[in-house]
Amino acid sequence: MYHSLNEDYYILVTHIVAGPKSLSYLIPFILLPTALCIPPSKLSKWQLASFFFPLIVAFQIHAWSCMEGVDVISVNLTQWSLVLLVCYDPRSAFRRLRSRLCNSVDSAFSGQAEKDDQPEYVEEAYPGLLRDRIAWVLTLLVSLRLSNWKIGDPSHDRKQPVRPMTRTKFFQYALFLAVQSFVILDMTSTWARYDPYFHTPGMSLDDPWQDATLQRSAYLLPFQKLPPRLVRTTVLAGQAYACITQGGSLPILPIIGLNAIGFWPDEWSPHTWPIFFGPFSAVGEKGLRGLWGTWWHQTNRYLSTPGHSLAPAVGMPTRSTLGYMMQVVSAFSLSGVMHMGLIPPRPRGTAMTAMGLRISVASFFWAQILGIGIELCISRLIEKVLGRLGPSLLWKSCTLLWIMLWLSYTLPFLAIPFRELGYWKQPVLPISLINRLSGGDWWVWS
């Protein structure tokens, strides 16, 4: 049985998804919290960074060599180590913001966050006691968005602390997202199941519809009047959005229930955290900058930190155009490398190499640097000629058209490797309302 499990694991991390194949993969997960638990009186920031960060990188390189490539989690940890050890000095500059209601065990389970009153917060600096320090550091390591942390950056700190939703409002919000995501995934999965573009290597995004295939579902027929590129990229964007929102809403609903009956503390309940996505209105007002900087989930926002730290070092104000672009280059360059980890070392069923698939995935993120640069130049030119324009209906409409045009030519960078890996051979969800309404079965997994 052990041999069978070992063989199955090898197939999983070699042909399906990249994963650890050596102990060196796990060591950085110990090194980073260990480093941050060492007080400044023992090692200064640069002593800590110069010893631990190269050590973490060395173990990661060995792990990637054994894996024949990178994976998302290990790259994420390396980049997070760069931010916490090199770019920032959390032990001296960071303050954790804690609600007074959550400072005691009794009140943590009292459900006080259900009240609409603004809770009172206290700032918790780097603790002196090792026991408190470990809890402080471990909380920091999972706070990728640095919500409810003051880090010494005014642009971040003035938005802290995050005002929590009530439990009821958050439950309603999460339930709405779960239902919305189900509908979007059902529609997009149905389309992907019947559109040969999502299953045929080499097929162009602009290739015409095959009516005989799409007529299998009457609910798809109206969309055939639209341009193929528009519909197919909308399917791609819809699936990406719905998968992320579904993963960030449905699994946390039981946790809200446990919090309501006192089995989960308020401090660790999702309703006290910032919501995953920002206002969509930012997309119409700011274009790609609003899409990626405000609306889209901000889990990887810390990737702009190296650029934010480097700009002042080379004499550029962080709020200048060049300083901003340095942050954009940092964020999307590192994000492209991290998402390379979606590709397994030896993918099956494709004529493309693993590196070719990785470059295709990364190219989508790298292309956003060019898009934001173009957008910034055009908006600055418009401001010089016409002055600063408010977010009028015409402005928002033009901006949304620009977004649709840009994504229609960059999203295929993601579609190609996902199609080669067979992501659309099975629907995302096992049940389909559209398939049932079209005369088929509820169950669509084969």
Image (cartoon, grey):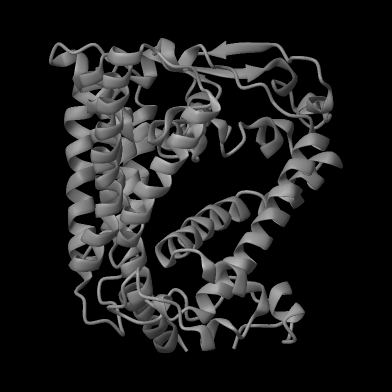
Residue drawn where x is 56% and y is 67% of the image: 223
Residue drawn where x is 80% and y is 46% of the image: 258
From the top left corner, tell me how far across and down residue 184 is, in percent.
Answer: 62, 60
From the top left corner, tell me how far across and down residue 354 is, in percent.
Answer: 22, 70
Q: Give the total of numbered labels.
A: 0
| Residue 143 in view, yes or no | no
Q: Can you tell which quarter of the image residue 13 is in?
A: bottom left
| Residue 285 in view, yes or no | yes
From the top left corner, tell me how far across and down residue 2 is, in percent.
Answer: 44, 85
Q: Is residue 59 above or below residue 330?
A: below
Left or right, 228 with respect to 340, comes to right
Left or right, 321 with respect to 232, comes to left
Q: Nearer the viewer, residue 330 or 411?
A: 411
Residue that lies at the very extreme toward the left in this rendered image: 314
Q: Nearer the viewer, residue 206 or 293?
A: 206
Q: Nearer the viewer, residue 53 or 369?
A: 369
Q: Can you tell which quarter of the image residue 174 is in?
A: top right
Residue drawn where x is 74% and y is 41% of the image: 173
Residue drawn where x is 49% and y is 17% of the image: 390
Left or right, 378 with respect to 437, comes to left
Q: Quadrant of the C terminus?
A: bottom right
Residue that lies at the very extreme toward the right in this rendered image: 261
Q: Is residue 357 above or below residue 193?
A: above
Q: Is residue 172 above or below residue 84?
A: below
Q: Is residue 385 above or below residue 289?
A: above
From the top left corner, tell me how far across and down residue 244 is, in percent.
Answer: 54, 53
